[in-house]
Image (tube, grey):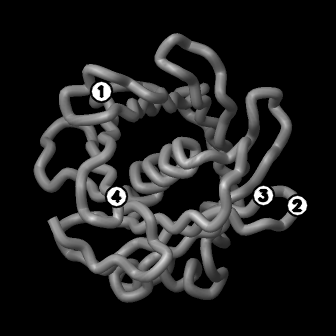
Amino acid sequence: MAFNIHPGESHTIRRQFFRPLGGAFHVYDPAGRPIGYCRQKAFKLKEDLRICTDESCALELMVIRARNIIDFGATYDRTLPTGEALGSLRRKGLTSSFLRDQWLIFGRDGRQIGHITEDSGTKAFLRRSIDLMNMLLPQTFHLVREDGTMVAAYRTHFNLLVYRMSVSVFVDDPEIDDLVILAAGCLLAAIEGRQG
């Protein structure tokens, strides 16, 4: 499967084209080879995503689950399949609803280690105000460590049929590793991708 990969982009997250119940995303390396699969469970009151090595879901790598059923500034806990806590992601509810999308990333100890922010307040306003702008101005997010270091970027693509996001990883970080970056990308694709 060939993708239009820009220089520096390391992964692609693509929504499964036809899945009547729940959502699903494939994760690809730069050569277009599948390296992971994210399944969004259907009929759950709390958001529940499972990141696996492939579609069989025989080996789960991470679970992302919402803490509450209804939460304006929802927090999503990241755990190993064994239940061991890895940290969490929290959506800044008010800011994300009216200005631009923002997420906070917390480590195992509950300390904020980074944040994800949508590219431009003006573009975000246009996307929320005019439906057509969702297609003409695809979203870009930046994942930044608390010390200001840019760790990764997420770029959505114009596509009428299938939601697709490219991921660029800029630095190796022991706290925000590739699995955390891809898990955050899958969560963005599941939550933000639904808004378009």
**Amino acid type, residue under disc 4 in the picture:** Asp
**Amino acid type, residue under disc 3 in the picture:** Arg
Q: Are marks 1 and 4 in contact (CB under 8 Å)?
A: no
Asked if 117 appears above or below 41 in the picture, the reply is below
**SS for dot 2:** loop
**Amino acid type, residue under disc 2 in the picture:** Asp
User: Residue at position x 13%, y 41% from top?
Assistant: 20
The answer to which quarter of the image holds residue 103 is: bottom right
**Amino acid type, residue under disc 1 in the picture:** Phe
Q: Earlier in the sequence, mark 1 or mark 4?
A: 4
Q: Position of residue 123 (x, y in %)?
A: 56, 85
Marks 1/4: CA distance? Answer: 30 Å
**SS for dot 3:** strand
User: Residue at position x 60%, y 26% from top?
Assistant: 67
Residue placed under numbered mark 3 in the picture = 145
Q: Nearer the viewer, mark 4 or mark 2?
A: 4
Q: Are marks 2 and 1 in contact (CB under 8 Å)?
A: no
Asked if 103 appears above or below 111 in the picture, the reply is below
Q: Earlier in the sequence, mark 3 or mark 4?
A: 4
Residue placed under numbered mark 1 in the picture = 43
Q: Nearer the viewer, mark 3 or mark 1?
A: 3
Residue placed under numbered mark 2 in the picture = 147
User: Residue at position x 59%, y 35% from top?
Assistant: 76
Residue placed under numbered mark 4 in the picture = 29
Q: Nearer the viewer, mark 2 or mark 1?
A: 2
Q: Residues within 10 Å of mark 1 (few under 14, many from 20)?
A: few
- Residue lying at the far top of the rendered structure: 82
Q: Position of residue 81 (x, y in %)?
A: 47, 17
